[in-house]
Image (cartoon, rainbow, N blue to C red):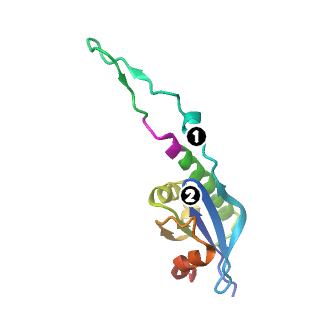
Amino acid sequence: MRAKVTWVVVADGQKATVYRHDGPGKGLQAVDGIGGTRAGPRTHDIMTDKPGRDRGFAGASGSAAMTPRNDPHEVEEQRFIEHVAEQVNKAAAGKQFEHLILAAPPKALGHLRHALSDATSKLVVAALDKDLTKSPIPDLAKHLEAHLAV
């Protein structure tokens, strides 16, 4: 009987690596071409130099600075996570794996889960709300050993 292939997506808002696990004793191997690192733009490259001004309502004196409605860095991180999810969705549609494990900080994990297609979401066997992007492969395997036995 052939072992089920499990993919492990380890991500945060700036870096993502996808690993492949082919069964017990096989270890984790990085999947080429999926994931990567987001080269985030600097704040002054994605925002104006100072906030806009609000003149207020009729009869009000002076003006006040308007605060931005969202953090541009968070928007960029969400776009990066969506790009990673798109790649994983394509691989799932191509039946490149049978099980999927997600590991990301809580906010990135939420964006990742939201961006996965329904078909891909059904393949998720575990989701860890931890930032494991800087973990070496042996430590990563220890974090995931209970889930990789699937």
Does 16 appear above or below 100? above
Q: Residue at x 50, y 56 (%)?
A: 108
Mark 1: secondary structure: loop
The residue beneath circle 1 is 42
Residue 89 placement: quadrant: bottom right
Under mark 2, the amino acid is: Leu
Percent position of residue 58, x then y: 29, 12
Q: Judge whether residue 105 is colored magenta.
A: no
Q: Nearer the viewer, residue 60 or 85?
A: 60
Disc ID at residue 116: 2
Q: Residue at x 64, y 48 (%)?
A: 39
Under mark 1, the amino acid is: Arg
Percent position of residue 136, x then y: 61, 72
Q: Residue at x 60, y 57 (%)?
A: 15
Marks 1 and 2 sit apart, C-alpha to C-alpha, by 28 Å
Q: Judge whether residue 71 is colored magenta.
A: yes
Whether label 1 touches label 2, CB < 8 Å: no
Q: Nearer the viewer, mark 1 or mark 2?
A: 1
Is residue 17 in view?
yes
Residue 67 left/right relative to 101: left
Q: How many marks?
A: 2
Mark 2: secondary structure: loop
Give the residues in magenta.
69-75
Q: Residue at x 71, y 64 (%)?
A: 94
Q: Nearer the viewer, residue 4 or 51?
A: 51
